[in-house]
Image (cartoon, helix red, strand yellow):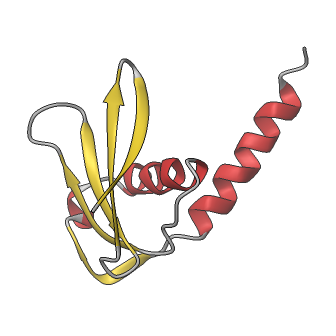
Amino acid sequence: MNIKPILLTAVFTVGTALADAPIEPDAIGVDQHHPEVVQALTTLVHISGYRCDSVSAVVKYVWGSGYTLTCNQFQYTYEVKDVGGRFVVEVTE
């Protein structure tokens, strides 16, 4: 199996997702995280099939491995966490 086309597709998809989620001017907690972390979180949300057109807030878990990501002017909130070595995106209400 040739892995190169799969990787190229993944890179293209990730690049497209990153361009679609600007940080809102009044975003909370974003300045406390490296920009690549914020981009990775929005990419995980996008490839999981959810919307994140702009970043409203990013909060790292105090205990455990994960983040709370809020998008679209605080309309959507996601929990992005490490479960068994894989990142899982869950929608919160």
- Residue lying at the far top of the rendered structure: 1
Q: Is residue 38 left or right of residue 31?
A: right
Compared to residue 23, the image places residue 37 above or below, namely above
Residue for point 58% across, 54% down: 49
Q: Residue furthest left?
A: 62
Residue 72 against residue 39 in the figure, above or below = below
Tell whether 86 sits left or right of 34: right
Left/right of residue 13 with respect to residue 21 in the rendered view: right
Residue 70 percent across, percent down from the top left? 31, 66
Residue that extends furthest to the bottom in the rendered view of this protein: 25
Quadrant location of the C terminus in the rendered image: bottom left
Q: Is residue 37 above or below residue 65?
A: below
Residue 27 figure quarter: bottom left
Q: Position of residue 33 (x, y in %)?
A: 27, 54
Residue drawn at x 68%, y 61% as measured from the top left: 16
- Give the residue drawn at x 41%, y 78%: 72
Q: Nearer the viewer, residue 66 or 91?
A: 91
Quadrant location of the N terminus?
top right
Spot occupied by residue 17 in the image (x, y as percentages of width and height): 62, 60
Q: Residue 31 at x, y = what percent?
A: 24, 65
Q: Residue at x 47, y 48 (%)?
A: 40
- In this view, the residue in front, 2 or 46, is 46
Task: Specify the quadrant of the image occupied by residue 88.
Answer: top left
